[in-house]
Image (spheres, helix red, strand yellow):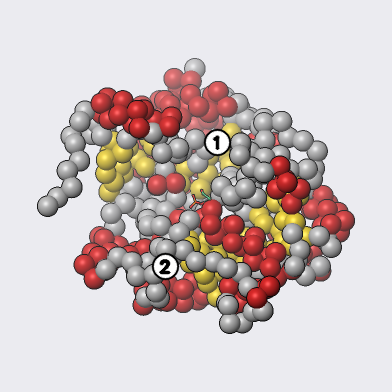
Amino acid sequence: MSVQTTDKPIDDLVAEAKRVLPGGSFGNMPAEVILRDGKGGRIWDENGKEYVDFLLGSGPMFIGHGHPEVTAAIQSQVPLGTTFFGNNRHGIELARAIVDAVPCAEQVRFVCTGTEADLYAMRAARAFRKRDKILKFEGGYHGMSDYALMSMAPKNPGNFPRAIPDSAGIPKSVRDEMLIAAFNDVEMVESLIKEHKDELAGVIVEPFQRLLPPQPGFLQALRRITKEHDIPLIFDEVVTGFRFAYGGAQEYYGVTPDLCTLGKIVGGGFALAAIAGRADIMAHFDRLAMADEDFLFQVGTLSGNPVASIAGLATLEILRRPGAYEQVFKTGRTLMAGLDELLKKAGIKATVIGEPPLFDVFFTDQPIKDYRDTLKGNKTIATRFNQLLRERGIMKGETKYYVSLAHTQADIDHTLGAWAEAIKALG
Ligand SMILES: Cc1ncc(COP(=O)(O)O)c(C=O)c1O
């Protein structure tokens, strides 16, 4: 028996989606984008239109779609069972690969999404410190939990350190458990930590916040200040893990946190994420190691399942090969420099920002170092530019170009051509 999916024309599929899904979509992309398949650095939609893919499934497909070695690994496991709940060999080996790769990782707990990983990392910090408040940075994204959805994208940023909920449905009381600081502002974060040190459970940060690189010394200062007060520092490496370097942003920027969260690449395109870090903090996940009141209760039906684990293992094996990161960085640098040059030549006020594996353009010539600076970018032009590019066979999210190991010179050439045309069409 095979599962029958229809071969309805795309317009009918869009209409169907609008009937059965709120907003006509899964919540991630517009209803009109219906993707059919992917190979390497390219994807095709249900109309058969081909795109160079800088969306990469929102980041996981770092080595490209349908990599033959990952596909073979998954196919070896699927007939043997897809989930067991109990430990399995591939999950244990993946945990060991993470411990070997990631500087802060002494132990690992698997979950299925970055949202969960961040939620439990914050909970682990609270269990360890026996305090409640978490400091995060304005504009920082740590998934969809009540605690994380604070001052992630405030339309009208308020006064620091007051948190502003980003969503309906979050209990009012939660905002009082979060403190908000400005990214890249050492002075502000130092004074907030000093003032609130007796209530603070932890500090969570994207070491590279969305598209904002840390200014020299910022992460080092965070490390110093949190260490002084024995406050766990959590790096959210859901995006940067195994992307900026095999050991993630902590290797790339040379700063080791106490805990980190991983997702996207580590699951090889399947639902797998992880909390990793210092053994004395991770011990709170261990019922036998902890008194009842210190035990952090955490289970998940699909955590560490063997299909996701073997997909992750196969992906990491490819990334360990000599030259993998050099190639991604070379592709990214070529693209960033190409875009910058085209925009400059056209006399458009714009700033290409990020690191080679992950970048985008803000339509402003003002310096950008924190969330409020990003609001200076002209969003109307950015949206129009993305639309013009989509028409020219470039698929990306609203605010990111994810670069892949699978992107080829032909992909770069197509992209440069599309950028040139789209910039001309911007007028
Ligand atoms: C930095 C960061 N943290 C957490 C998450 C949430 O991960 P997930 O979508 O797997 O829940 C994301 C997702 O894009 C992310 O970019």
x, y percentage for residue 144? 56, 47
Residue sitting at x 54%, y 60%: 117
- Circle 1: element type: strand
x, y percentage for residue 252? 58, 62
Q: In this orientation, does residue 368 appear?
A: no
Q: Horizontal placement of 182 versus 1: left or right?
A: right
Q: Amino acid at mark 1?
A: Val
Q: Horizontal placement of 128 versus 34: left or right?
A: right
x, y percentage for residue 243? 49, 58
Residue sitting at x 34%, y 40%: 52
Which residue matches tag 2? Answer: 304
Label located before the other in sequence (2 or 1):
2
Residue 411 falls in image quadrant = top left
Neighbours of disc 1 within 10 Å: few (<14), some (14-19), many (20+): many
Q: Which mark is residue 245?
A: none
Q: Amino acid at mark 2?
A: Gly
Q: Which mark is residue 361?
A: 1
